[in-house]
Amino acid sequence: VPNEGGDPKMTGFAVVGLGMGRNRARQVVETEGAELRAVVDLNEALAREVGAEMGCEWCSDLDDVLGRGDVDVVFVMTPSGLHTKIGVQAITAGKHVVTTKPMDVSTAACDELIRAADAAGVLVGVDYQSRYVDNNVRVAAALAQGMLGKPILGEVRFKWFRSQDYFAHGNGWRGTWAMDGGGSLANQGSHLIDLLLWFMGTPTRVYGETAIMNHEIETEDIGQAILNFESGAKGGILGTTTFPDSPYFSAEVHGTEGGVLIDAALSGEMRVFGDGLEEKLQAIDNPLANVVEDVVSALNEGTPLRVDGREGRRTVALLENIYRSSREGKAVDYCD
């Protein structure tokens, strides 16, 4: 992708959608080798405010950004059901694309975005910030290298609270199938579901139950799943937005030679069990701090993205299997 205008040594970014996108815009500004060229939001006042805060250009029309030669990468930070639509527009304009989590609301949409990126020869990735937390990286590497022995069980659990006002905000897209792709599992829980797949591999069988317990929404505010993995290990998922004060967001794995309890998956606080395991974990390096560094490295050094389109699609596929099992009221063979 040509980098016309701007510093040719810098990777130019545009951020579309300035809810969570505001944080990612700041991340671009603070990352070496990256330059925030523009921010975009349909809310013109918000776009102007964030543009002034970040010291970059702003607009409310996506086409104004896609026509710029100094924008190499487009961050799509909109409601989930718009990721593929906007992503394909950006790819058609020759841009690399990173979506916020989850990749989209269906595997069919994910496949459309992957095909578009493959045809255009550009990158597509998904921003799962837990993939860049040092201790999460260490646990994934330790499992891949057999440091925990034969894997036995992997669990992820979060107990958060979301008010009814949260679901009404932003035109009410959260908690809908069309724009959110699910409820507590798809939105808040997708970080942990991605971690579980990263740690434990591909499931072979899934049993899920979901329910609406305390909100007026289309999708679940509590979801649970039991998984069987190809390795023979078991897995568990629990997620809810009904728990007061949002206290809990964890991942736990163990095998025959040790275990790890990650008490805060977004910050990586953990407890380690097993002789010598903690020392082995601390020796594992994590060279990337965030998705912006990842993209800059991929474009300049040819390194693979931590979560490319095909990897990001896996979370959406597992969600579809959990929801299918819940609808059918029985365990289902995993289908990707």
Image (tube, rainbow, N blue to C red):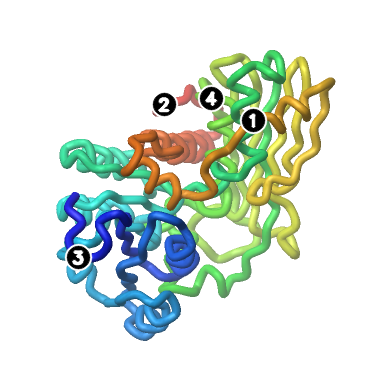
Q: Nearer the viewer, mark 4 or mark 3?
A: 3
Mark closest to the chain's N terminus, 2 or 4: 4
Which amino acid, by three-letter code, is at mark 3?
Gly
Which amino acid, by three-letter code, is at mark 4?
Gly
Residues under labels 4 and 1: Cα distance?
Answer: 20 Å
Residues under labels 2 and 3: Cα distance?
Answer: 46 Å
> Which numbered circle lies on residue 69?
none
> Which numbered circle lies on residue 5?
3
| Residue 265 horizontal/vertical position (percent) | 66, 46
Which amino acid, by three-letter code, is at mark 2?
Cys
Q: Nearer the viewer, mark 2 or mark 3?
A: 3
> Dot 4, crowdedness within 10 Å: few (<14), some or many (≥20)?
some
Q: 128 left or right of 275?
A: left
User: Are the residues tagged 4 and 1 within 8 Å (C-beta)?
Assistant: no
Residues under labels 1 and 2: Cα distance?
Answer: 33 Å
Residue 82 visible in the shown view: no
Residue for badge 4: 201
Which amino acid, by three-letter code, is at mark 1?
Ile
Residues under labels 3 and 1: Cα distance?
Answer: 40 Å
User: Are the residues tagged 2 and 3 within 8 Å (C-beta)?
Assistant: no
SS at mark 4 in the image: loop
Q: Residue at x 22, y 67 (%)?
A: 65
Relative to 203, residue 170 above or below: below
Residue 101 visible in the shown view: yes
Q: Nearer the viewer, residue 86 or 2?
A: 2
SS at mark 1 in the image: loop
Q: Nearer the viewer, residue 229 or 24?
A: 24
Q: Nearer the viewer, mark 2 or mark 4?
A: 4
SS at mark 3 in the image: loop
